[in-house]
Amino acid sequence: MILSCSNISKAFGSNTVLEQISFHIEEHEKAAIVGINGAGKSTLLKIIIGQLSPDSGEVVLSKGKTIGYLAQHQDLESSRTIYEEVLEIKRPVIRMEERIRELELQMKHTDGQKLENLLAEYDRLNHQFELENGYAYKSEVTGVLKGLGFLEDEFNKPVTTLSGGQKTRVSLGKLLLSNPDIILLDEPTNHLDMESISWLENYLLNYSGSVIIVAHDRYFLNQVVKKIVELEQGHSQVYLGNYEEYSRKRAMIRQAQMKAYLNQQQEIKHQQEVITKLKSFNREKSIKRAESREKLLSKIEVLEKPAEIKDAMAITLEPRTESGNDVLAIRNLSKSFGPLTLFSCVDMDIKKGERVAIIGNNGTGKSTLLKIIMDLLPGDTGEIRPGSKVHVGYYDQEQQVLHPEKTIFDEIQDEYPDMDNTRVRNVLAAFLFTGDDVFKRISDLSGGERGRVSLAKLMLSEANFLILDEPTNHLDLTSKEILEDALSHYTGTVLYVSHDRYFINKTATRILELTGQTFINYLGNYDYYLEKKEELTKVYTGQAPMSGLSVKTAGPLSGLTASTLSASLSAQTAENVWPGKPKDTAGKMDWKAQKKEQARIRKRQNDQKKAEEMIQQLEKRDGQIDTMLTLEEVYTDVGKLVELNQEKEEISKKLEVLYDLWAELAEEETTKT
């Protein structure tokens, strides 16, 4: 074990963020900390690194081990160039190299004992230099910078001229090259393109130290980590496995917890009903039984109701009208900015029901294409034709479609004036805006909040063609899953730009990769794209784009239309669930056992109901006899009096048996459940 967190608690004022958080990290282990926005992930990293003090608990780092940290936001101030800044992390190795060169010069002009001393120091430094990869430190720096997306002609850019995202990449490069025993990374993929993220995945997988990552990139987590620490409502739960295993186990645990809670609540209710019924019998034996059950009930450790995730959007995407089969046609489209050509001679068709993802490196023109389609930017050449009955809904990652001077409430109501105040509030509540939050100005919102407002407008648009630019940016894991589910069930057409590979893998039916000023078409999800990428990129980017046909089709599905692909998938699905397929013996046995148990439960319920009905009838008759015995014409008639007393005795004996039977049946239900 290299790091231990024991009972970490932290509150800010009355807001408890972390409560009794405990987990440990082994040497060489790769772990992730996940949770919704505001769960305390970054706070926990800052406590581990020592930037914040916990209110209670302790962090223990193994003796002699080093730790490095990349914060989410970097304010890197330096007069050096990018290369010089990153190279500075190798200063100890550089000094060692300088000393080795000095020793070489001194040894040329020295002899005797002094020479032997210099040789000894020279051998020691050379050995250390080799251990620290001294002969390759410059290529190591170059490799890391290129891996993080910097071009060689950018190496001499001054750090002061860089954007916040570029500064974060420089800081990440320095951290990786410093080679600490534990690396803490807070959202390291935020400012990286797909190729850089893939490079970072491989780097971390082969990293000899331990890694703790906070990230919303589920594909990245799936590839890198083998342990997940989930933070929820201040508490922690540790799961072994990658993100998909965590997601599956979490769902199973939540389901089991809710089932256990509901079962216990049902049992408590049943016991309370039995106790009430036994007391109503008003006999000593029944009252004792009721009191015994009350004692047992008081000793039950009542389970807390599992927390329902209240920080989850409720989004339903459904088109108001159906479009024609041809949703969008693009012909001979080109776009350049000065000498930089983004794409040229693009022909593209989008068909009804497709979910098309556009991917590619930063700066290749993905978002530009969407803006041209939306008529927010002009194309240099070409034509864009929407199909019949196409109604477009647009999600802009820059949120330029929102009005900064308006409140959230006005943003929705002005767009949809037919909606009354209550409905507007209900819609906003579904996107986590409640109370006075609805009167916040758009200009005062965070990126995530603006994204939720845009998604609310998108849902209300009831469009049949959604054009989305980085829709998962700023969304937490839960919200991403909800959006994925909504898009997967959406019956319209979707064209989107995203760098979220997990999201693409879950939602895309086709991928268009923008590379080499052209689009390569892959008829499948992200996994299929990875399988075919190298092969297709070599084939198509080595050729000049053909005039009027710059979308190339990858793989064995070439030529399939959306409708034939859909029919093919439907046929496969039908084959998988064909009722003639043999069922396994274990399944039959389970079914028989289930039917037998259901029959037993029905019989017990019927027997108990009959016993209750007979008890009610006999108690009613017993009450009637008591009333009759008070009548003068009865208690003065000895024959009638004897007859009624005998009947009352018989009723008492029957009731005794029925009370015991009812109690036994109630006990049987308790035992079986």
Image: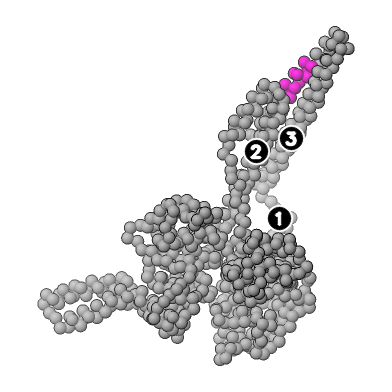
Mark 2 / mark 1, whichever is N-terminal: 2
Highlighted magenta segment, given as a residue range: 648-659
Say which of 615 and 673 sits in front.
Answer: 615
**Could you say which disc has been placed on residue 581 in the image?**
1
- Apparent side of residue 74 relative to residue 330 in the rendered image (left or right): left
**How many angstroms separate mark 2 from mark 3 (CA)?**
15 Å
Res 405 quadrant in image: bottom right
Q: Position of residue 272 (x, y in %)?
A: 67, 34
Residue lying at the far bottom in this picture: please name it: 339
| Residue 267 numbered mark, or none | 2
Badge 2 amino acid: Glu
Residue nearer the viewer, 249 or 444: 444
| Callout 2 touching callout 3 (CB < 8 Å) | no
Mark 2, Cα crowd under 10 Å, few <14 / some 14-19 / many 20+, is some
Q: Is residue 381 above or below residue 197?
A: below
Classify residue 32 as left or right of residue 174.
right
Q: Is residue 656 magenta?
A: yes
Name the residue rendered at 72%, 40% in the picture.
Answer: 598
547 drawn magenta: no
Callout 1: 10 Å neighbours few (<14), some, many (20+)? Answer: few
Mark 1–mark 3 distance (CA, rounded to whole Å): 37 Å
Residue at (42% x, 58% y) in the render: 53
Q: Which residue is mark 3?
A: 605
Residue 178, horizontal then vertical, whole percent: 37, 70
